[in-house]
Amino acid sequence: QVQLVESGGGLVQPGGSLKLSCAASGFAFTLSAMYWYRQVLGKQREMVARISTGGERTNYADFVKGRFTISRDDATNTVSLQMRSLEPEDTAVYYCHTRTWGPIWGQGTQVTVSS
């Protein structure tokens, strides 16, 4: 079964950190570029970060550069997003995504940044 399952979301205070994880199954993970997207209610889903196959190249949206780090572990078919210096504007549902074999989305995990 092709699946992406996110975890690690929650409530965090401004300036805090959170690490999201995404477990992949049912497709050739090591041959797939992986993405994190986020969506605020009522707004379009936007790309946060991308990591190439093998992890050699990463790309970030301007609004997270220097604060978020995407990584992957091909041994465990997992992609992670380490988020630091979180701001209230980072509040959103975060989604794991790949499209190498056709679009696959996880169910999303809620991140709320609030005092």
Image (cartoon, rainbow, N blue to C red):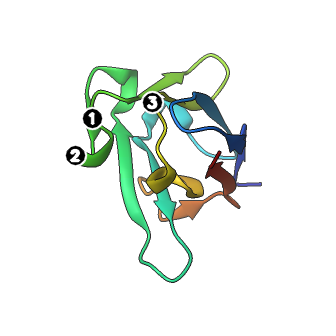
Amino acid type of disc 2? Answer: Asp
What count of labels does the image hold?
3
Q: Position of residue 112 (x, y in %)?
A: 64, 52
Q: Position of residue 30 (x, y in %)?
A: 49, 30
* Residue 114 - label: none
Measured as percent of width and height from the top left, residue 23 is found at 69, 37
Q: Nearer the viewer, mark 1 or mark 3?
A: 3
Q: Which mark is residue 65?
A: 1
Within 10 angstroms of label 3, few (less than 14), some, or many (20 or more) residues? some
Quickly name the residue at label 3.
85
Task: Say whether residue 71 is left or right of residue 55.
Answer: right
| Quadrant (top left/top right/bottom left/bottom right) for the N terminus | bottom right
With 63 as the anchor, is 26 left or right in this view? right
Residue in the picture at 50% in, 66% down:
39
Tell which tag, 3 or 2, sits nearer the viewer. 3
Q: What residue is shown with label 2?
A: 62
Where on the picture, by quarter, is residue 51?
top left
Q: CA distance from mark 3 to mark 2?
A: 14 Å
Q: Callout 1: few (<14), some (14-19), or many (20+) C-alpha neighbours within 10 Å?
A: few
Question: Is 78 above or below relative to 111?
Answer: above
Up/down of 35 relative to 53, above or below: below
State which tag comes first along the sequence, 1 or 3: 1
